[in-house]
Image (cartoon, rainbow, N blue to C red):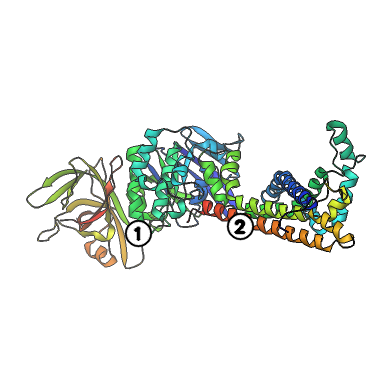
Amino acid sequence: MLTLTPVESVALLLSLKVGVVGTLCSLPPALLVAWLLARRRFVGRQLLNGVVHLPLVLPPVVVGFVLLVLFGRRGPIGAWLYDSFGITVAFTWKGAALASAVMGFPLMARAMRLSLEAVDRRLEAAARTLGAGRARVFWTITLPLMSPGILTGAILGFARSVGEFGATITFVSNIPGETQTLPLALYAFTQEPGGDPAAFRLCVIAVIVAMAALLASELVARRLDRRIRGAP
Amino acid sequence: MIEVDIETRLGDFTLAARFTAPAAGITALFGRSGAGKTSIVNALAGLLTPSRGRVAVRGEVLFDSERRIDLPPEKRRLGYIFQEGRLFPHYSVRGNLLYGTKRFDAAAFDRVVTLLGLGKLLGRRPGDLSGGEKQRVAIGRAILAEPRLLLMDEPLAALDAARKEEILPFVAALRGVLDIPVVYVSHAMDEVIRLADTLVLVDSGRIAATGTVEALTSRIDLRPLTGRFEAGAVIRTVLRGHDKVFGLSELAFPGGRLRVPHVDLPLGTPLRLRIHARDVVLANAPPVGLSIRNAFAGRVVEISPDKGPLVDLRLDIGTPDQPVMLWARITQRALTDLGLRVGSPVHALVKTVALERPSPGGGRGLSEAHEAV
């Protein structure tokens, strides 16, 4: 009961890998988008805001299908990736990571934007009068002060990645050992006669993973907060 | 020189400020809240871009709209001490102090830490500091960035009276020890008189007058700006003698000597005094049979055109080539009875003086009221 079956451990490890890679990949662009939306005034800002939030409101199947069209072997981006670097995304775990990165993106960008808007710009002004250029101000003042928001965004994105189903199954299908993450494995068991006990075990694993992520983020966020505020 | 000539609109407020001040000692920007003082300092620092104009410090142009020069704040090398300190909460006190240093100079660091009494605070976080401690760290942080000019925007406004007294000597020490010129924004005349050499009066986005503290505080036409009830002249004196028998000290100024209770400072110390208009009594003959010993002959230079029961008179009690201005506040009735007009000879009796601090160039500050004797 306490040991995982091979199917379970493969699905769990794959889920974690997909979640971590997906989160790390969408972190920098999410930070950039958060910065653009919070700090810049430009034509098309509302449009960008809308596009960023699309994965949150669209049926995941639509996202998966668009990814398939763009990143499939014969799709415009997929063909270029294969011809230039020999990378295949569709129907591989990389595709699963891409799908979960796209689905988690709005949550990450949103959390980061909120934390960036909460950064006291007067501190940035003070840093500049002390001789720090824009880049140094960003790395030494802005980024550390918004770090709790970055962490929250990353955890939300990771949780979303681990739970992602619709876009993944549409884009990379349900291949055990390659693209079969926890939710996909769970879905597969529910389709088999007598698969309910196995599905239930995967449910419990999913709950444990989610709870662990939340607890870890809570602990780290509290430490970061203490660092920033300086109060014990 | 500090040269400012800027114009900009901020909402429905128009700032059109033009002045020059020596880049030495402490220059105070004085005016009511909302007069535009902070905007002027922000334009100096590069945190506000005026729509038109020019800003230069010691010959270097920081902003010039015609030549399209606008140095970013980090290139201007102006230290800025904000009203709220603005310490970085995620750095320790030491980290804050070192933030603006180009390379670590242990001797300079230790000197600033000692000067500002920060030794015990170095490992702490800004969140654990009192308001006065925060401001001291902010001053140290700005100094360690080696600025060519320090901007202080009401650094004491957020502190209570006791904390102010804790910080003021440090600000005064900046002049003597570090020799960094300071632009000091304030709406408190007592701070200005205690600290400043040059006074820039700001009124509704414009510069009403620029000059020495002594000159501007003695001008009757500027009284609405310099403050009516605290009105008083500022004069420079030198500690010339101690009278051990009666426990007195003598302060010399061109045209006379003022006796005050013993001042524990070495002879030759320059001292700046403030004599409130309400503490000066006038007589049209040399006084006899009075306890007041500080009486100076002079003449009336100006009479305020006030309609109320009180008038202010400006007197010159100095020598022909070195005028010393004094104010006296008397009633209209007294003015009529004594028959005083511009040019009338008069005797001024001084009841009380406030020793503000050693004059520019001096060391530690002090402020105490003294009964004159």
Element carrying mark 1: helix
Residue A51, percent from left and from top: 80, 52
**Foreground residue, B285 or B168?**
B168
Q: Is residue B323 visible?
A: yes
Residue matched to label 1: B161
Between the residue at mark 2 and the residue at mark 1, the CA separation in whole angstroms equals 42 Å
Residue A232, percent from left and from top: 47, 56
Q: Is residue A91 left or right of residue B211?
A: right
Q: Give the label on residue A138, or none.
A: none
Give the vertical position of B268 relative to B371 (above or below): above
Give the vertical position of B333 relative to B204 (above or below): below
The structure residue drawn at horizontal position 81% and vertical position 54%, both measured from the top left corner, is A55
| Type of amino acid under label 1 | Ala
Element carrying mark 2: helix
The quadrant of the image that shows the N terminus of chain B is top left
Residue B160, percent from left and from top: 38, 59
The residue carrying pointer 2 sits among few (fewer than 14), some (14 to 19) or many (20 or more) residues within 10 Å by Cα, namely some
**Foreground residue, B243 or B364?**
B364
Residues marked 2 and 1, same chain:
no
Residue matched to label 2: A218
Q: Is residue A44 visible?
A: no
The structure residue drawn at horizontal position 28% and vertical position 42%, both measured from the top left corner, is B363
| Type of amino acid under label 2 | Glu
